[in-house]
Image (cartoon, rainbow, N blue to C red):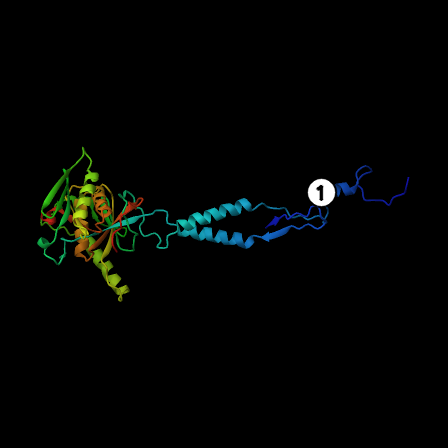
């Protein structure tokens, strides 16, 4: 099994064909294809990290009144963003949650408190998981890397 | 007319030289048939490059479960090995074993207890096994919740509470990764 490389020589008497032995190369390729096909991961999945402050064990050491608390409350009417003492209701747009306004308000909150990294996402029982993930994703997008997912009752609002 | 030495022939009119050239040369001519392998090698090379690009050193951590449609997220992190809790509307599984049904979780318990006993026990066993197998390492308390996007928070709350009471404070939610939105992913 080889491939010949014609280097001319038609005019001359001696043919200058050089033969490349491709057997080891094909062997290597076949082995690699077999190995990679066996170890291939076809489903690419990822994760969103969340913590569970306020459930089970004690969370922050600093008393909550000394810290500005940012809470995204998710309920049937929409969002309610709580930044310290301020409450910003973000009602639904028709049947959908208004993630654009939530993004804008979280951006403002981040600008007002640039050192703040944690956000609590507090949910009611009937909220779909998809909505919660999108809310957490929005908070991560606005550079709040420490997300806690808690029950709306545990948020203390 | 000059006299020539006789040559091999089949019949009077067909010389054997002509037959030899038609039938392959009788041992003198090379019988190697050239095989064009260029296309085959091209295909194999492209296949190897594609497979190398999709190669994941960590292997398959999560398997796609039946009846679970994962939510999409833009600000994701890479998965890490941890106990996997699957949550669908009908059933809750821990590493593939059923630990509770959806009906049980949607019911309000009379005592207000949110703990799923079987899930809690399985998680505690997994934690103890980890500590036995990795005595030098700290237990990070990480578990992965692979929940369907239409599951209500009421079910998740009980699952998360059971995980928290078993010592798993860091919950990772399995998501389908989308193109990153330019923000920093969750801190490790």
Mark 1 Cα within 10 Å, few/some/many (few <14, many 20+)?
few
Q: Nearer the viewer, residue B99 or B3?
A: B3
Is residue B138 shown left or right of residue A22? left
Q: Residue at x 23, y 49 (%)?
A: A143
Chain for numbered disc 1: B
Where disc 1 sits, the SS reads helix
The quadrant of the rendering that contains the N terminus of chain B is top right
How many numbered marks are there? 1
Residue at x-position 46% and y-position 47%: B47
Q: Position of residue B170 (x, y in %)?
A: 21, 55
Q: Is residue B25 left or right of residue A119?
A: right
Q: A80 or B52: which is nearer to us?
A: A80
Identify the image quadrant of residue B135.
bottom left
Residue hosting label 1: B23
Q: Is residue A44 left or right of residue A27?
A: left
Which one is nearer the viewer's eye here, B31 or A50? A50
Residue B82 place in picture, x, y as percent = 27, 55
Q: Quadrant of the C terminus of chain B?
A: bottom left
Image quadrant assignment for residue B169: bottom left
Q: Residue furthest right?
A: B1
Residue A15: percent from the left, percent from the top? 68, 50
Q: Is residue A86 left or right of residue B101?
A: left
Q: Is residue A76 visible?
A: no
- Residue B147 is situated, as x and y percent measured from the top left of the image, at 24, 46
B5 over B136 or under it: above or below = above
Please indicate, yes or no, whether residue A155 appears anywhere in the rendered image: yes
Q: Is residue A134 above or below residue A61?
A: above
| Quadrant of the image occupied by residue A61 | bottom left
The residue that appears at 53% across and 44% down in the rendered structure is B39
Residue most toward the top?
Answer: A94
């Amino acid at each position: 099994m080889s491939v010949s490389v014609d280097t001319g020589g038609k005019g001359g008497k001696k043919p200058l064909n050089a033969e490349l032995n491709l057997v080891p190369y094909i062997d290597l390729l076949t082995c690699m294809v077999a190995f990679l096909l066996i170890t291939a991961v076809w489903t690419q999945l990822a994760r969103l990290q969340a913590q569970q402050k306020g459930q089970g064990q004690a969370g922050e050491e600093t008393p909550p009144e000394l810290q500005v608390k940012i809470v995204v409350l998710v309920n049937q009417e929409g969002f309610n963003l709580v930044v310290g003492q301020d409450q910003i209701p973000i009602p639904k747009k028709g049947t959908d949650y208004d993630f654009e306004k939530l993004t804008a308000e979280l951006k403002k909150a981040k600008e007002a408190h640039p050192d703040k990294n944690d956000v609590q996402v507090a949910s009611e029982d009937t909220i779909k998981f998809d909505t919660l993930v999108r809310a957490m994703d929005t908070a991560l997008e606005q550079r709040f890397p420490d997300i806690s997912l808690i029950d709306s009752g545990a948020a203390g609002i | 007319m000059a006299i020539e030495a006789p040559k091999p022939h089949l019949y009077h009119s067909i010389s054997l030289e002509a037959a030899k050239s038609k039938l392959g040369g009788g041992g003198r001519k090379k019988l190697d048939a050239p095989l064009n392998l260029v296309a085959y090698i091209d295909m194999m090379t492209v296949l190897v490059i594609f497979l190398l690009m999709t190669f994941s050193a960590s292997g398959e951590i999560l398997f796609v479960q039946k009846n679970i449609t994962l939510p999409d997220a833009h600000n994701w992190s890479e998965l890490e090995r941890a106990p996997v809790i699957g949550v669908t509307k009908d059933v809750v599984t821990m590493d593939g074993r059923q630990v509770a049904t959806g009906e049980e979780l949607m019911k309000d318990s009379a005592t207000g207890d949110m703990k799923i006993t079987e899930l809690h026990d399985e998680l505690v066993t997994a934690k103890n096994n980890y500590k036995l197998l990795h005595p030098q390492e700290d237990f990070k308390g990480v578990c992965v919740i692979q929940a369907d996007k239409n599951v209500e928070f009421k079910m998740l709350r009980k699952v998360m509470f059971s995980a928290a009471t078993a010592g798993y404070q860091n919950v990772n939610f399995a998501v389908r990764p989308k193109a990153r939105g330019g923000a920093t992913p969750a801190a490790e």
